[in-house]
Amino acid sequence: AQTVTQSQPEMSVQEAETVTLSCTYDTSESDYYLFWYKQPPSRQMILVIRQEAYKQQNATENRFSVNFQKAAKSFSLKISDSQLGDAAMYFCATVYSGGGADGLTFGKGTHLIIQP
Amino acid sequence: NAGVTQTPKFQVLKTGQSMTLQCAQDMNHEYMSWYRQDPGMGLRLIHYSVGAGITDQGEVPNGYNVSRSTTEDFPLRLLSAAPSQTSVYFCASRREPGGYTFGSGTRLTVV
């Protein structure tokens, strides 16, 4: 079984500043993906960034980057130059990438507030 | 537009009623899954399917049934709704593990 822990129920950051959201996970699998999803009030699940566990290089997508520490089972999300549109719930998730089963395991989420 | 379509978007049920939440995808994805989202709990896996005719239970399957007769459709059935099933339900599909597509969700209230 996999578990995902997000220890920050809520974070607040000034517009244009940088913020880091924390995520730790536990899995017995060697092949897996890690994700960060954004959920605005519209409740749509939006993929922010993903990382394959076998890749050592940290994934980046424009202003979003991750710090993937495989041995520590840590997967934090850094948002640079925060914008008002970044305000949302952020969920960390993982999935086994082998065959035969499916389903993401999510953390409980971090509510990100952007102060103008 | 290609994607995952969930119907209805909102539903109110009385305790004991039955209903089916519909999920359809037009991307020929083999893998489909259902989740529920409760306040403060994140999304939790209810059931999943790895192909037509193949389904299995997730973390919180009690009170829900699924079937997968076609690649496109993966309905979720509530046989006898309970107030504890009040939640937002999401359907998702994928081909490869890194490429999930989510539906827009169904908000279900059981009174």
Image (spheres, helix red, strand yellow):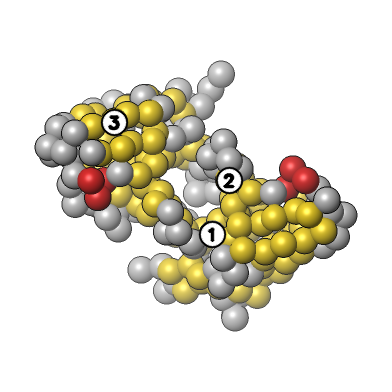
Residue at (87%, 54%) from the top-left corner? A16
Question: Mark 2 — on which chain does it sit?
Answer: A
Query: Which element type, helix, strand or loop, lies under badge 3?
Result: strand
Tell which of B64 and A2 is nearer to you: B64
Mark 3 closeness class: few <14, some 14–19, many ≥20 residues within 10 Å: few
CA gap between label 1 and label 3 equals 26 Å
Does residue A107 appear to the left or right of B78 in the view shown? right
Query: Which element type, helix, strand or loop, lies under badge 1?
Result: loop
Q: Position of residue B52 (x, y in %)?
A: 28, 33
The residue that label 1 is drawn on is A109
Same chain, labels 1 and 2: yes
Tell which of A30 and B32 is nearer to you: B32
Give the residue type at disc 2. Gln
Evaluate whether residue A60 shows in this view: no
- Label ID, residue A39: 2
CA gap between label 2 and label 3 equals 23 Å
Evaluate whether residue B5 shows in this view: yes
The tag earlier along the polypeptide, 1 or 2, is 2
In the rendered view, would you say B64 is above or below B58?
A: above
Q: Position of residue B27 (x, y in %)?
A: 48, 27
- Label ID, residue B12: 3
Residue at (55%, 48%) from the top-left corner? B98
Residue at (77%, 46%) from the top-left corner? A84
Same chain, labels 1 and 3: no
